[in-house]
Amino acid sequence: MRVSSIMRPLVQAELPAQAHRDDRGRTLLTPWDLDHAEYVRSAYGQIRLYSGSHHQVALTLVRVLRMLRDALDDRADRVATLEEIDRQRDAVIDDARRAVLPDSELTPLREAAR
């Protein structure tokens, strides 16, 4: 998933302040003040909604979310982000179960989530 090539460095980076003063004394504002968890929700929420009945997409998504989690595992300042990653991962599995995927496809999803 290409979005993950952007998300990994983003969730590891410090986000800029919402307001910044430039060298001419002007205050520049970002239009949105998103935190890392909101970026995760925005990046993966829609993909997750459509992955439930598509085993390969769901499996890739679970693996990507696990990779993001591993990248942040030692970051005590990213608790909310880790919680959102876990929520998204669990929701992928729940969506796949609701789509009535067979156990032969659900089992690899559960294993990849660990």
Image (cartoon, rainbow, N blue to C red):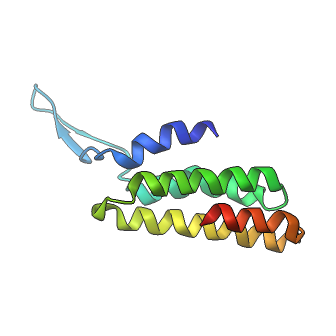
Residue 82: give x, y in percent of width and height: 44, 64
In front here: 19 or 39? 39
Task: From the viewer's perspective, tell me whether residue 86 is left or right of residue 91.
Answer: left
Q: Is residue 24 above or below residue 114?
A: above
Residue 74: give x, y in percent of width and height: 33, 59
Looking at the rendered image, the quarter that the C terminus falls into is bottom right
Task: From the viewer's perspective, tell me whether residue 69 is left or right of residue 75.
Answer: right
Q: Is residue 24 above or below residue 82?
A: above
Looking at the rendered image, the quarter that the N terminus falls into is top right
Residue 62: give x, y in percent of width and height: 65, 57
Q: Check the image and name the residue furthest to the top.
A: 24
Residue at 19% across / 39% down in the picture?
20
Residue 24: give x, y in percent of width and height: 10, 25
Residue 96 makes an appearance in the image: yes
Residue at 15% across / 33% down in the picture?
26
Residue 46 makes an appearance in the image: no
Residue at 87% across / 66% down in the picture?
104
Quarter where residue 53 is shown: bottom right
Task: From the viewer's perspective, tell me whether residue 85 is left or right of residue 90.
Answer: left
How many numbered discs? 0
Quarter where residue 101 is shown: bottom right
In front here: 1 or 38? 1
